[in-house]
Amino acid sequence: ARAALDGLDLKGKRIAAGYSGGVDSTVLVHVLRQLAPTLGYRLSAVHVHHGLSRNADAWRKSCAAFCREAGIPFTSRRVRVVKAGKGLEAAARAARREVFESLRVDAIAFGHQLDDQAGTVLFNLLRGSGLAGASGMPVVGKLGGKPLLRPLLAAPREAILAYAKANRLAWIEDESNADEALARNFLRRRVGPLLASRFPRWREALARAARHFSARGADERALLRAFLRDKGLRAP
C-alpha cells in the first residue's frame, strides 16, 4: 500500500476511504490509518447503506464502532437503489458512485485488490470490451474529478486475510458474495479456482496484461491528441 501512495503529494489532503465493513475495506481503513501520520493526510471513512440486506443496519453500526475506536471520522450515507435495465448490482454501484462523487474531499480510496483486478479484466474480456475494459482498474484513477486511489490493488486476497488476522481485525461477510447468479461471483467462486489449478499465477498475469493494455491505450490517446492538435481541433 505504501508503494502505491509514494510519489503522491498527500500532505494535508482529505482522503475518504470507502468502508463497507468487508475484509478488503476494513484492511484499507486500517492501513491508511497507519500511514496517515507519515504521509500527512487526513483520513475519514464513508459507509454507503444500500438497505438491500436485512443485515445492513448491523453493518453500519459495526463500521461506526470500528471507526469510533480507531479515532477515524465516520460518515454513513443511506441511498435508494432503483433497479434499472442493467440489474440490481449495477444500480447499487451507480448509487454508490453518486455518493463518492458528491463528497467534499481531495481524494477517495477504495479497497480493490488483486482478485478484483483479475476478475474485472476477465469479466470485461468475456463481454468483448476494448482497450478500456481490458485495462482494468488503475492504482490512481479519477472519480467525480477527484483522484481515486486503490493502494491494495497489487495484494492478493490471501495477503488481505493474513493482514486482517494478524492485526485482529473484525469484518462482516456480505451474504450476496455467495450468490453465483451474479456474474462476478460466479467468476470468483467457480472460474477462479479452476484457472488456479492449471495457471497458479493467473491473477498476476491478468493484472500485468491490464497494465500493458492501459499503456497501449495511453499511447493511442496521446497520438489522437497530437493528430487533433495538428489539425487545429480540440481533443475530446
Image (cartoon, grey):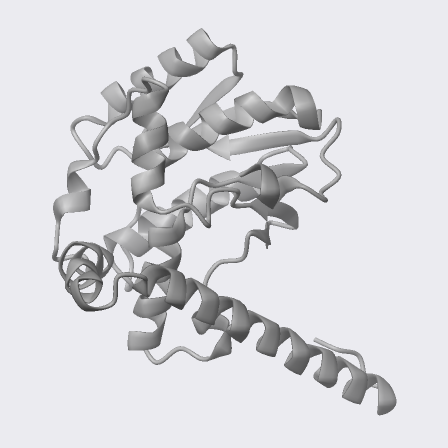
Q: Is residue 180 above or below residue 107?
A: below
Residue 181 picture quarter: bottom left
Q: Is residue 160 above or below residue 198?
A: above
Tell me if 11 is positioned left or right of 82 in this view.
right
Picture coordinates of residue 178, whole percent (x, y)? 13, 45
Farthest bottom residue in view: 231
Tell me if 145 is positioned left or right of 230 in this view.
left
Q: Is residue 12 above or below residue 189?
A: above
x 54%, y 28%: residue: 32
Farthest top residue in view: 69
Picture coordinates of residue 76, whole percent (x, y)? 42, 24
Residue 118 picture quarter: bottom left
x 45%, y 71%: residue: 209
x 65%, y 82%: residue: 220
Q: How many marks?
A: 0
Picture coordinates of residue 155, whole percent (x, y)? 42, 45
Picture coordinates of residue 122, whole percent (x, y)? 32, 68
Residue 80 in view in this figure: no
Tell me if 88 is positioned left or right of 224 in this view.
left
Name the image quarter holding the C terminus.
Answer: bottom right
* Depth check, front residue: 56 or 154: 154
x 75%, y 26%: residue: 12
Residue 229 in view in this figure: yes
